[in-house]
Amino acid sequence: MDSRRPPLAPACPTLPEYVRHWAETTPDRRAFTFVEHPAPHSRGVHRTLTWRRLDVRVRALAARLAEEAGPGERVALLCPQGTEYVAAFLGSLSAGLVAVPLYTPGLPGHADRLAGVLADARPSVVVTTSRAHDEVRDFLGTGGPRIVVADEVPDGGPDRQPVPLDPGGPAYLQYTSGSTRAPAGVEISHANVVANARQALAAYGLDTRPMTSVGWLPLYHDMGLVLSVAAPVARGALSVLMDPAAFLHEPVRWLRLLAAHPHAVSAAPNFAYDYCVATVTADQKEGLRLDGVTALINGSEPVRPGTADRFHAAFANQGLAPGTHCPSYGLAEATVFVCAARPGQPLSRFALDRDALAAGKALPARPDDPRAVLLTGCGTPAGQRVRVADPVTRVPLAEGEVGEIWVQGPNVGRGYWNRDSEEVFGAEFADGAAGPGRWLRTGDLGTVLEGQLVVTGRLKDLIIVDGRNHYPQDVEASVQEAHEAVRRDRLAAFAVPGGAGGECAVVVAEHARTAHLAELDVAALVRAVRGAVSARHGLRLADVVVVPPGTVPRTSSGKVSRALTRARYLEGAYGGQARTGAAV
């Protein structure tokens, strides 16, 4: 029998010890289910591992990997989404190796990043599956790391005692998404990931109630790995996985899995909720019941109140409770989770004066004021400390003042692999104003309002023109509302060198798939964009470039990469695209 309520979880120091615990105490309970969609309109083929079966596969892979690499060496995971990925990750940890969660070379647009990460991590061995073996072999070329094919490793083999693991030692390298700079590998210890899994469970009230994790986020992404692997392992709960491509092809598949599993918890970036609203049809909603969903975590990019409103309005008739939307904040350097709004609570909304916000003050404005910035609160910390500091003076700031978000807790990573990390991971407040100890400088900007963290943007992304600060995501929101032909969430605003040593602002935006560039009045679109940005932000755009769908680069987690878009713009990569010419 598969009881819906797992027993209370023990306090194990590592994820492999949790796996062994659940295999001994609840061997026949379902641990991981991967739902494959082999055909365009497939309802899904389920493949499940029980805790006993997962333990068998983890032990077999750990023994095989130990034949290829020694303790502390890196193991790159180039597997498709699925249970083999989970077993390979946990097997690497069990063998005392350092996992490097990655993806297969076939992921569109990310071959250069994959090559760069492999060159940085220098793995001794690569794990893949028989389905992806040939493309992985061809990508690595001759003289590359040794390849282990996970699904060809037999269950048997010599008995092998578990390797004693140091909780403070590195468990895996979590490479950052690269939205603002080149990806860097964060060293996450065994203790870090266990602490963060337990923090996430506590934050969403899942440490004492039944849960099923339902996820399509890629397992190489920090949120996907913790929510779909680490947290369920620490809780002894079922995790249901699907491929990110399956979600993108037919978003209703995700909603059907949420409906099929009671006490479902899931996470997605902001754009995914808007995507569901735009693409799920009335026929697909028929028979869909979402009243059993516990929490929908919204993170990875600024959470927009309008997105939550549209999503809940679209699926209210399917029983979706308004309190399920949980804006959250996190980053790879802190394993992932930092702050979260709790399930069952109304969305915290803040309408702030745009000019004051640009000057570093969070002052209230009327929500209907066109110059107001609408933001959501991301709740409170979970088992860690969060402060807002002046990024220059390192002095703690009061509530309502905007500064850099600093984090301290057992989930903060050890540092960047093979890089000097002291400036980021070893920060201290001036004169010890916030107490002793080292803090993580996140590079994110925010403030505290009504006891909640409100994230306002990225320090490195700020557009500074004529001495005034402009948040790029705020400018981007105005651009995509200015004309229906601008594709939502597929545009980037950034600063480039201007005259007299200053900076000027540029926007590169994809046009909607329904619009054909040859028939599009680009001049009218650009006029609308320039007018909207000027009126709302007092900002004159130096250039507006309209590009075809799929042109604006994205990070491995699906966010637009402003850094790479800016680099390509400066290289002249968009010179042949539609534009009205740069302003002079």
Image (cartoon, rainbow, N blue to C red):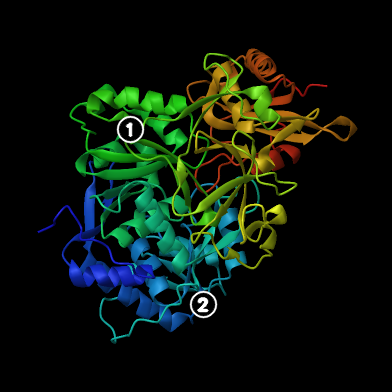
Does residue 211 appear left or right of residue 182 in this picture?
left
**Dot 1: within a 10 Å radius of its alpha carbon, few (fewer than 14), some, or many (20 or more) residues?**
some
Q: Residue furthest left?
A: 1
Q: Are marks 1 and 2 in contact (CB under 8 Å)?
A: no
Where does label 2 land, which residue?
72
Task: Please state which amino acid type lies under the numbered disc 2.
Answer: Gly
Residue shown at 27%/72% (left/top)? Answer: 20
Task: Please state which amino acid type lies under the numbered disc 1.
Answer: Gly
**Dot 2: within a 10 Å radius of its alpha carbon, few (fewer than 14), some, or many (20 or more) residues?**
some
Does residue 78 appear left or right of residue 254 in this picture?
right
* Percent coordinates x, y for residue 3 in the rendering: 13, 55
The answer to which of 172 and 190 lies nearer the viewer is 190
Q: Is residue 44 above or below residue 73?
A: above
Q: Helix, strand, or loop for circle 1?
A: helix
Residue 264, picture quadrant: top left
Q: Is residue 44 above or below residue 125?
A: above
Residue shown at 72%/53% (left/top)? Answer: 430
Residue shown at 66%/57% (left/top)? Answer: 427
The answer to which of 325 and 532 lies nearer the viewer is 325
Image quadrant containing the N terminus? bottom left
The answer to which of 95 and 204 lies nearer the viewer is 204
Observer-side mark, 1 or 2, equals: 1
Residue shown at 32%/61% (left/top)? Answer: 234
Where does label 1 land, which residue?
323
* Percent coordinates x, y for residue 291 in the rendering: 22, 33
Q: CA distance from mark 1 to mark 2?
A: 44 Å
Image quadrant containing the C terminus? top right
